[in-house]
Image (cartoon, rainbow, N blue to C red):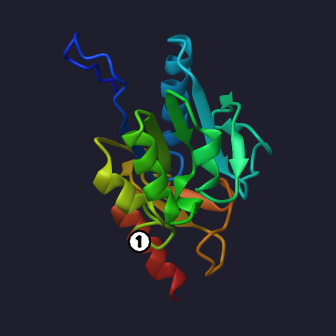
Amino acid sequence: MFIEPRVGNKNYSARRGWIEVICGSMFSGKTEELIRRLNRAKIAKQCVEIFKPAIDTRYHEVDVVSHNANAIRSTPVKLANDMLLLASGCDVVGIDEAQFFDEALVEVCVRLANNGTRVIIAGLDMDYLGKPFGPMPALMAIAEYVTKVHAVCMSCGDIASYSFRKAASVERIVLGETDTYEARCRHCFQEGMKENQK
């Protein structure tokens, strides 16, 4: 379990920012972990702002909601740069479904962290083809802390790190739930991709 780092020098009083990334496949608990960390920051009476992409309205227009129905209030935004003004002066910024944002998200997160903000990002690290997804690879490279969470393969019960799309579509972004996606292990993901090519 991730435990928030502490600044070791008790004489150091300035705020220090950093970037945390929570990544994994569909149904792996990314949003659940994001909400847990943000709630801990709220309990500590820190100023928290949460963002999600405006296109993600699967569970709620405004709230960030996990598959387990845990929710936290957020601000939907269309572009990553919209967060800079809205997050001004916050101690902690949470960002869900980061893979859906434009590439400017990387610079936005760097600027926030450089200004003393703790930035917590959750998102899919791979798309339905098993390829790196959106700004997530760059965010993982620059983050101080990366947590990869895993699901359970819905075919065999093994550890899953892939999001297998059951629906026939070649669009990179298709919003969906268990009707559209399954968490799969590497072997079952490859088998499913072979079946789709027939």
Q: Is residue 56 visible?
A: yes
Q: Nearer the viewer, residue 195 or 97?
A: 97
129 to 65, vertically: above or below: below
Q: State how many labels appear.
A: 1
Where's residue 63, x and y in %?
Answer: 73, 37
38 to 98, vertically: above or below: above
Residue at 40%, 44% in the rendered image: 21
Residue at 50%, 39% in the rendered image: 29
Where's residue 11, x and y in %?
Answer: 22, 11
Q: Is residue 197 left or right of residue 16?
A: right
Q: Quadrant of the N terminus?
A: top left
Residue at 66%, 71% in the rendered image: 167
Pick out the residue farthest to the right: 61
Q: Nearer the viewer, residue 186 or 110?
A: 110
Q: Is residue 100 left or right of residue 149?
A: right
Q: Is residue 133 left or right of residue 50?
A: left
The residue pinned by badge 1 equals 131
Q: Nearer the viewer, residue 46 or 130?
A: 46
Q: Nearer the viewer, residue 190 or 37?
A: 37
Q: Is residue 191 left or right of residue 77?
A: left
Where's residue 135, x and y in %?
Answer: 45, 62
Where's residue 165, x and y in %?
Answer: 57, 67
Element on which disc 1 rests: loop
